[in-house]
Image: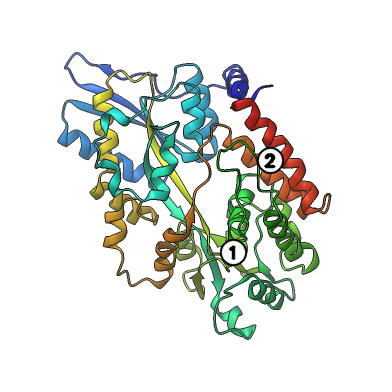
Amino acid sequence: MQSSTAWKAIATTLVLTSLVGCSSSSSSDSASGTQTINAWIMGDGTWKDFYSKLADQFHQENPDIQVKLDFIPWDQGHDKLITAAASDAGPDVTTDGGRWTTELAVMGALEPLDDFLNDTYKKDFVDAAWETTQWKGRTWGIPQGFTTTALFYRTDWLQQAGYDHPPKNWAEFEDLAKKMTHNHHYGFALVGDNSMDTTMFWTPFLWQNGGELLSKDLKKATFNSYAGIQALQFYVDLYRKDHAAPDSALSTKRNDANKLFTNGIAGMTTTGPWFFSEIKRDKPDLPFAVAPYPVGKQAATLATTDHIVMLKSAKNKQACWKWIDFVTNPQNSQAWNQTIGFIPYRKSGLAALANTSDPNFKVLLNEVQNAHAYPTLPDWPQIDDEIANAVQTALAGKKAPKEALDDAAKKVDEILAQSN
């Protein structure tokens, strides 16, 4: 099956086997002349509280526009959105995981936003965040959430291991992980399940070792380079040779890794700023600190970006753009970042927090300068799956790192050849 048509098969299956069950597909004009925007927000809880208030505020400032919100759990968001977009039953505007945006764009489901932007608009956005909105020379979304990742470590375990500083390089990281491992305690909460979480936390090691995921023209896989093989061998050694990660690593997702850390089972984990609120809620007295990823040949970390996008089927596009612009303006974007604990995606937001007194959050802020983003490709979710499968296969000992990555690279090359 050609990858360019893969979404159609997926969407058709989902349409036949599931019910989207959300709002109608288009905005409408009521008898009173009020325009209604149907907007989806990925997330619940904190997302619902914040965006409900934001929609009320928007209506007060724009009494002729009503925003009707539906909140979609993140783990259901991708399938619901693809299904809805394929059947023209989607909302007018939605937030999405940034990696979904090009997938929706290639379906023809999105409205490009360039006509709403002036020349200076994008200058206030962090480059690593803005780049994720670009595909084939057009702008398909606006950043709406942005994070970097770093190393969270137990300060008391660090001292007990004889260290007076967090690991600065791979050798120190491996040594510290081994020293923290004893009596059913482990040095590293390694994420190794067969999902995007595994790609998310292994890829910084690839970049740090000088590797890249794909060629510059995005036509060939390069994660199976010598740098990639070394990076995966490092991961495999931590798990299989040093036994510095729990046996459950092959089924560990990022939330599981966070639990291993807060429950005192693992001394280090790699994660993002969303973890602060979890620690504060579950283990407010946990002695921990944050450091940059231990460096291989160069510093690198992953930046992830959520977007807000407009559907092609939206009728009142100017009203939709008003909502998008309102959500992402400097004031509201900063309010959201402070609410959820994310990194500002606007440069003005970064500047406002430059003198933060929180040393742990400052580490994640500083990591923006080392941030890399995934390639913006419609087939990225499939590529992400192949990389995660290769990492897990090597961790399980079913294939050597080179064989696992080479096999994945062949499949990714086929995906890319079909989509180009």
Q: Position of residue 318 (x, y in %)?
A: 24, 25
Work out which quarter of the rendered image holds the C terminus and state it: top right
Residue 226, by quadrant, is: bottom right
With respect to residue 214, does 312 lie above or below?
Answer: above
> Which mark is drawn over residue 269?
1
Residues 83 and 124: in front is: 124
Kindly tell me whether residue 195 is visible in this rendering. Answer: yes
Amino acid type, mark 2: Glu
Residue 246, by quadrant, is: bottom right
- Disc 1 and disc 2 in contact, CB within 8 angstroms: no
Asked whether, in this view, residue 382 is left or right of residue 96, the answer is: right
Residues 309 and 403: in front is: 403
Residue occupying the far front of the picture: 217
What residue is rendered at 69% in x and 49% in y? 193
Amino acid type, mark 1: Thr
Kindly tell me whether residue 43 is visible in this rendering. Answer: no
What residue is rendered at 79% in x and 63% in y? 240
Graded by Cα atoms within 10 Å as few (under 14), some (14 to 19) or many (20 or more), the crowding at tag 1 reads many
Graded by Cα atoms within 10 Å as few (under 14), some (14 to 19) or many (20 or more), the crowding at tag 2 reads many
Asked whether, in this view, residue 388 is left or right of residue 305, the answer is: right
Q: Position of residue 264 (x, y in %)?
A: 62, 70
Residues 14 and 398: in front is: 398
Residue behind mark 2: 386
| Mark 1: secondary structure | strand
Q: Position of residue 321 (x, y in %)?
A: 27, 30
Residues 34 and 133: in front is: 133
Q: Position of residue 219 (x, y in %)?
A: 61, 35
Residue occupying the far right of the picture: 398
